[in-house]
Every structure is written in C-alpha cells, then in structure tokens.
Amino acid sequence: MNQATLRPSRPGDEPGAYYVCLKTGDHGRDGEPFYREDPDALGRLFVGPYLAFEPDLARILEDPEGICGYALGAFDSREFYARYEREWRPLCTRFPAPAGDPATWTRSTTGV
C-alpha cells in the first residue's frame, strides 16, 4: 500500500497542485474535458493565489506518484481577497476575455 504524506508547500508545487485542481475541477469529477485549451486555468484561479500569498498555510498531499491533494487556507479571508483582486487578477489579463459568439465559448475561455 502506498503511503501519502502531508507536507508544507514549496516552490515548484504549482504544476502538480494545478493538475489535481484540474482533475477534480468538474464538481469533484475530472474537469480535463472542459479545459483542454488551458489545463492550468482552474489552478491559476483557485490554487495559485494560495500557494503564492499563504505558503505557510498551504499543505501538499504527496504519494510516491506525486502530488495527489492539497489543503489551502488564509489567515484573513478579507485581506486575502483584497490582495487577490489587487495583485493576482491583474496577472490574468494576459489571458484575453472571450470574444465572438457566446455559444462557442468554453469554460477555459470564460474563466468559469
């Protein structure tokens, strides 16, 4: 039986944590079919800010195959959200808003 270990986050955990976010990104089911154009979209929105802003509270679950889970938190949710709006959301402007017929938009292009 493979043992998993819960450890503090460290630089370089983003790809593995983003992948876990993707694989659970459809209400706990595999979200990959919805984010093929941008597999990091969910992780960038929901995991990245915690790893960047609250690394002391971020825990990574890892087994012999790699990162398989995480626990994220913030000491002050209001301050975290304010910092997210101020510092993280502007980084997302490099990903353009969807254009054209909304019927052709995907979850990746709308950021949902």
Image (cartoon, rainbow, N blue to C red):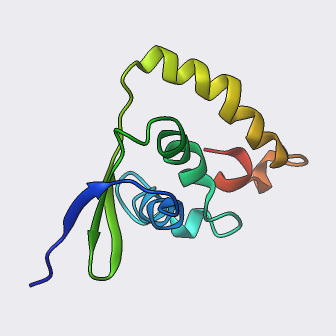
Residue at position x 61%, y 63% in the image: 35
- Above or below, 60 relative to 101: below
Name the residue at the right extreme: 100
Give the side of residue 86 with respect to residue 104, left or right. left
Q: Position of residue 110 (x, y in %)?
A: 71, 45
- Above or below, 91 relative to 15: above
Q: Quadrant of residue 81?
A: top right
Q: Position of residue 37 (x, y in %)?
A: 71, 67
- Above or below, 42 relative to 38: above
Name the residue at the left extreme: 1
Q: Quadrant of residue 64?
A: bottom left
Name the residue at the top extreme: 78
Q: Nearer the viewer, residue 38 or 71?
A: 71
Count of marks overlaid on the render: 0
Q: Nearer the viewer, residue 58 or 106?
A: 58
Quadrant for the C terminus in the image:
top right
Q: Position of residue 56 (x, y in %)?
A: 37, 39
Residue at position x 80%, y 49% in the image: 95
Give the side of residue 100 with respect to residue 29, left or right. right
Q: Nearer the viewer, residue 16 or 102?
A: 16
Quadrant for the N terminus in the image:
bottom left
